[in-house]
Amino acid sequence: MSQRALSKRQAEALEFIESFIISNGYSPAIRDIGAHFKYQSSSTAFKIVEALVLKGYITKGEFGARTIRLTKKVAAHKAQDTTPRTDSELEECIKGLTQAIQKALLYVNRNSDKWMPDVAEKVLRDALKGVPVNVD
């Protein structure tokens, strides 16, 4: 299994495969992938799928259509993909985290008599929804 990073085309195909499975409840056929990206030949989509298999992001049955399955490595790739790459993305993360902490502190101040750690965790998780966070 190769540990190299995904190319832009491979990452796009992986994202399409994941969203297709979520939307339809079954995996796309090679032709679906090729049609989505408007490839002239389905062999281009086939080569991308094979590269994703070799890199461990998906598995594919030997026989039959629609046998593509995502692996756990997809979740790791997505977590890695949310890491801030620019100063503005980092500033946005810091802003979201600051707002989450302020919201939690406000809750604590208003409800100090019934403070519970699980409530604090919920408040922080709710406040951080949509904020890209990667904790190693």
Image: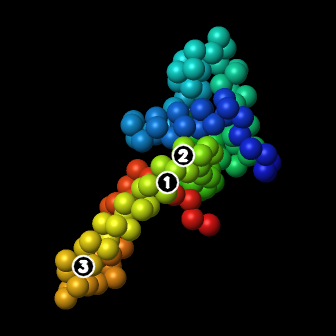
Give me the residue at 56% from left, 59% from top: 134
User: Mark 1 sits on what residue?
Assistant: 93
- Tell me what residue is drawn at x 56 percent, y 26 percent: 33
Between 47 and 13, the residue placed more toward the observer is 13
Q: Is residue 99 left or right of residue 136?
A: left
Q: Residues within 10 Å of mark 3 (few under 14, many from 20)?
A: few
Q: Is residue 43 left or right of residue 111?
A: right
Question: Quadrant location of the C terminus?
Answer: bottom right
Q: CA distance from mark 3 to mark 1?
A: 24 Å
Q: Quadrant of residue 42 in the image?
A: top right
Where disc 2 sits, the SS reads helix
Describe residue 24's horizontal placement relative to residue 82 as left or right. left
**Position above or below: 71 against 22:** below
Q: Earlier in the sequence, mark 3 or mark 2?
A: 2
Residue type at numbered disc 2: Glu
Q: Which residue is mark 2?
A: 89
Residue 47 visible somewhere in the drawing? yes
- Label 1: state its secondary structure: helix
Q: Residues within 10 Å of mark 2 (few under 14, many from 20)?
A: some
